[in-house]
């Protein structure tokens, strides 16, 4: 089930990116992008911690924790950076 959840997040990430490019959806992933690029695991195009492609991951709409307002399943670090 985890595999299918990850595929869904990747799919929604690319979909949100495309919709944003065409001006059909407002979703800011720039903050997440810079957080990932400054992280020691965010070198290159993929996250070295979880293996996800960063550009897809930052655009995915992960559930948000009511406790710290960070994504659940987005950033793989504990505690997550975003």
Image: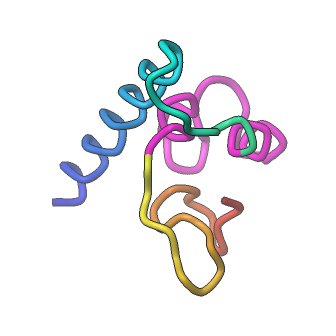
- Residue 26 placement (x, y as % from top left): 55, 34
Q: Nearer the viewer, residue 39 or 30?
A: 30
Residue 50, percent from left and from top: 50, 49
Q: Quadrant of the C terminus?
A: bottom right
Provide residue 47's location: percent of width, then percent of height: 60, 40
Residue 17 covered by magenta stretch: no
Residue sitting at x 44%, y 57% = 62
Q: Residue furthest bottom?
A: 67
Looking at the image, which is closer to me, 39 or 59?
59
For image coordinates 45% across by 62% down, the residue present is 73
| Residue furthest right in the image | 38
Q: In the image, is residue 63 above or below residue 74?
A: below
**Majority secondary structure in the magenta region:** loop
Question: From what the image shows, is residue 71 above or below residue 69?
Answer: above
Viewer-side residue, 59 vs 74: 59
Magenta segment boundaries in residue numbering: 32-60
**Left-right relation of 62 to 21:** left
């Amino acid at each position: 089930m985890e595999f299918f959840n990850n595929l869904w997040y990747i799919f929604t990430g690319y979909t949100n990116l495309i919709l944003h490019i065409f001006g059909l959806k407002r979703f800011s992933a720039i903050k997440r992008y810079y957080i990932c690029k400054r992280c020691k695991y965010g070198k290159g195009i993929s996250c070295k911690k979880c293996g996800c492609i960063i550009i897809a991951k930052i655009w995915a709409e992960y559930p948000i924790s009511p406790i710290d307002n960070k994504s659940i399943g987005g950033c793989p670090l504990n505690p997550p950076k975003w």
